[in-house]
Amino acid sequence: MYSAQSPSERLASEEMPLPIKYGFPRFLVSMISLCLALFAVIVFASSVGPVSVPFEQTIAIILKKLGLHMEASFTERELLVISEVRLPRILVGALIGAALGISGAAMQGVFRNPLVEPGYVGVSSGAAVGAVCALFFGWSQFSVWALPFSAFIGAALAVIIILAVWRGSRSRSIATLLLLGIGINSLLSALINIMVASSTNDQELRSIIFWLQGGLEARTWEHVQLIILPIMVGCLITLSFGRHLNMMLLGDDQAASSGVNVRRTRYILLALASLMTGSAVAVSGIIGFVGLVVPHMIRLLTGPDHRFLLPASALGGAIFLVLADVISRMILQPVTLQVGVVCACMGAPLFIALILRSRKGGRTT
């Protein structure tokens, strides 16, 4: 039957945040559950591997790194394996997953489109071009930080170019920005293919392909230190825009009438998503589906209220990527798969299942 509701009213009835008195208890339970799940996943990921470490000793070592004490004995070998080999890799994965998860949730709110993820505005492709240039031209031989720095610069330049063209265009709609992102992604992918085809060094070619698939191999505490500040600061600032994103779901005019500076909010959130995604991609390579699938899954737990969705997506992304890394290490031992490949294998079926579920429910999640 035809409904007399306007598009804004229909959107409000479907996507408006839950009232605090009903939504907060559910959110609190969800957040506590996600925090406990993240800790359990970190302990599990630290324990399993070619050298297996009992859970009790693993927890004791993790607490020792946090400056806490637990009555449990462990060997120097177990301490070395967990604290210097596995834990840095796991924390890098958790930080990257959190960055991609919260960036995906924020960008889906900005674009009012549940099928958007950080790579759509050229962040991942820009970082890929920067990293491939570092490998192709040999910059990575001069310093261990040359590759992540080049990747971050590439991501920043790609976003700046897209936003500059968008501001200079006659149509400043969200659809135009997405189309520009798709166009820039195609151009940058072509540049990457040119460098891959022109590579004459087999080791250089393998390094490029390996990086483009995304991985967490050989990550150290230095990599944790490199990304923890931009990702944590980006997450904290993004969390403060939960109410703004709720208002923007109703459309730009409705948000502006509610006191939201739509243009400034959009630019800030795009910049924050670019900062976090660029930092993540700079140390891991391209990892897809986290920023696309995780916010969908989290909405089933917390609902569409961005005040709840953003922090839950960060925790969910961390859990998702750490689990994917465990699978990449264990499923074909002694062969190690790239975590980006595992994320695609996990993310694609989950995404298809979510789409089918939303179709049966008559609405998108």
Image: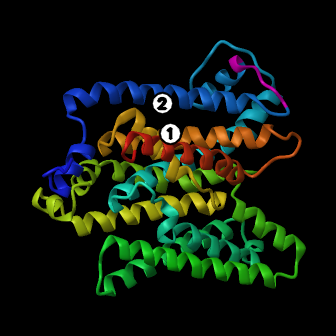
Instruction: Please name the amino acid that badge 2 sits on.
Output: Leu
Q: Are marks 1 and 2 in contact (CB under 8 Å)?
A: yes
Q: Residue furthest left?
A: 257
Q: Residue furthest top?
A: 71
28 or 16: nearer the eye? 16
| Residue occupied by mark 1 | 316
On the question of residue 137 being in view, the answer is no
Question: What residue is rendered at 56% in x and 69% in y?
Answer: 152
* The C terminus, quarter of image: top left
Numbered label attached to residue 34 = 2
38 or 342: nearer the eye? 342
60 or 115: nearer the eye? 115
Q: Left of 62 or right of it: where is 313?
A: left
Q: Position of residue 29 (x, y in %)?
A: 38, 24
Picture quadrant of residue 190: bottom right
Residues packed near mark 2 inside 10 Å, few (<14), some (14 to 19) or many (20 plus)? some
Q: Is residue 208 above or below residue 117?
A: below
- What secondary structure do most residues of the magenta stretch adopt? loop
